[in-house]
Image (spheres, rainbow, N blue to C red):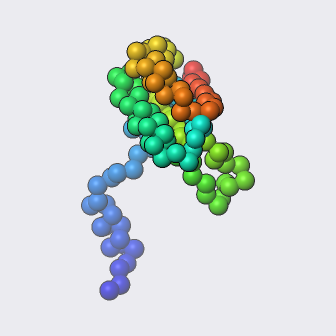
Amino acid sequence: MSTSRRDFIALASTLPFVASAEPSTKMTFIHHVLFWAKNPTSTTETDQLYRALKTLGTLPMITSAHVGKPIVTDFDKSVTEASYTFSVVLVFDSAEKEKEYLYHPLHKKFIEENMHLWGKVQVIDSQEPAA
């Protein structure tokens, strides 16, 4: 069955619009943390760390949370940092909200109960410049 460009445009105009130029979460302040597990081959330890990291994302001052593992694509292999075990990206509305998070009892408990699981941590915070 042959479809003309006109038929395609007519069909496309009936489909719901799902793409957006604006992100669904305003990313004003980003708290990005890389964790290197002390024993990366220990499934028990890495599973515990992963579960604990996921719990942090439930705090109310966080607008969005992502916990992931490294991935390397062929396109940017030569410049990709992939030696870490977990990457955590937390999005806040402001630096003040991030400060609330840093001093929150659940965050302090996370550090206390899990710091034995990591050998290295690197924090990268960034804030959207004022317009």
The percent coordinates of residue 92 (x first, y second) are: 45, 24
Residue 40 position within the rendered picture, expressed as x and y whole percent measured from the top left: 57, 44
Residue 25 in sight from this viewpoint = no
Report x, y in % for residue 95.
Answer: 51, 17
Name the quarter where the C terminus is drawn: top right
Above or below, 125 against 104 in this view is below
State left or right for residue 76 relative to residue 97. right
Image vertical order of residue 4 relative to residue 37, above or below: below
For residue 111, say whether it is visible.
yes
**Front position in the image: 28 or 89:** 89
The residue lying at 46 percent from left, 24 percent from top is: 113
The quarter holding residue 130 reads top right
Q: Position of residue 12 (x, y in %)?
A: 33, 64
Residue appearing at x 39%, y 20% in the figure: 106
The structure residue drawn at horizontal position 56% and vertical position 48%, both measured from the top left corner, is 41
Say which of 61 and 51 sits in front: 51
Compared to residue 45, the image places residue 14 above or below, namely below
Residue 83, quarter of picture: top right
- Look at the picture and state if 127 lies above or below 85: above
Q: Residue furthest bottom?
A: 1
Residue at screen point 39% across, 50% down:
19
Count of numbered labels shown in the rendering: 0
Quarter the N terminus occupies:
bottom left
